[in-house]
Image (cartoon, rainbow, N blue to C red):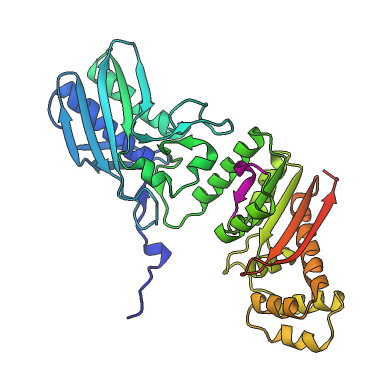
Amino acid sequence: MKKQTKDPKDMRHGYTTGSNATAATKAALLSLIRQEPINTATITLPNGDVVTFTMESVRFTENQAEVSIIKDAGDDPDATHGARIISTVRWSSQEGIQLDGGIGVGRVTKPGLPVAVGEAAINPVPRKMLLETAGAVLEEAGSRRGISIVISVPDGEEIAKKTLNARLGIIGGISILGTRGTVVPFSTAAFRASIAQAISVAVQGNCDHLICSTGGRSEKYAMELFPDLPEEAFIEMGDFVGFTLKQCKAKKVKKVTLVGMMGKFSKVAQGVMNVHSKSAPVSFEFLAEVAKQAGVPEEFHEQILGANTASEVGTNMYEHGYTPFFERLCQYASEEGLKEVRGGMTIETILMSMKKELLGREAVTWDKQ
């Protein structure tokens, strides 16, 4: 039976780790103050939505409350969907509110992230949510006692293996994230944010040459080509070529090497900077013109025009030894990338085959800012 796919408009939104942690913290603090189990908590999200969350478990004593909640990411394929998030709230001898991460919440070990080195990876917006929500509960209860809040994710270290946290210098677990409070199914915002953070970490680590690949296979190939570069220098940009280049330009990166395959980079060479399969079709007329410019015999032009995929064109050119075709294509891709950012750096494009063969490699420098 053919698998049914939902219309994006019908997909169910979920809630971020930050929203879940905040709701669990409110329930824990109320349970501690009232000395009775509080199983639901209503909070206001950063986007203004007012949402009520149901807790998985509530335990408390006179001095401590521990509440767990199960994250629901809606219909988004989020790595943290179904994760248990625990907030432990204790009365403290110190004034004010102390916030920290426990088991499964990562620690920041590299500069360049919005959280200081050494602190728990609780990002600024959820940190603000947690502190403001707890402060409001204390004020409403008329309590001036200090509290400590510890957010834990028991499976966080395992979940983090599915993310870029280790490369970003977040060790020991996941990050507590969220700027809107909600998770939009298949949103690209989170991926773009991870690209921006990865570039920031690389620059803070004094990398002035970044290697940006379109996927895992091309990244592994790139690491073989540049074995002396640190891991931070490798950025997985997916389809967001233009966005990645602009982020590099903003951070004053001197050289960017793009590594990928025929399908996506044929589009870049045409000036298409979001290379998702639905963004724009590959122009076989363009590829035939590149072949003509590269001195490929005319008999191959019709074959290119009749091809089904850019990869098919690449295989044909490679098997017949027409390397100038790939050099010209790489040159176009580098030039179009420089047009996108209006110069100010060197862009190199490396084309590889599915079999990890080097097809072409060209770098172009445009010093104009």
Q: Quadrant of residue 266?
A: bottom right
Identity of the residue drawn at 52% across and 26% down: 116
Nearer to us in this view, 233 or 39: 233
**Magenta span of residues:** 229-237
- Could you tell me residue 355's position as x and y percent? 62, 69
Q: Is 314 left or right of 31, judged from the image as shown?
A: right
- Could you tell me residue 350's position as x and y percent? 72, 60
Give the answer, above or below, for where 337 lies relative to 229.
below
Quarter of the picture holding the N terminus: bottom left
Q: Quadrant of residue 47?
A: top left
Give the answer, above or below, for where 192 lies relative to 269.
above
Nearer to us in this view, 185 or 113: 113
Q: Is 10 left or right of 237, judged from the image as shown?
A: left
Quarter of the picture holding the C terminus: top right
- Could you tell me residue 58's position as x and y percent? 17, 34
Identity of the residue drawn at 39% across and 56% down: 76
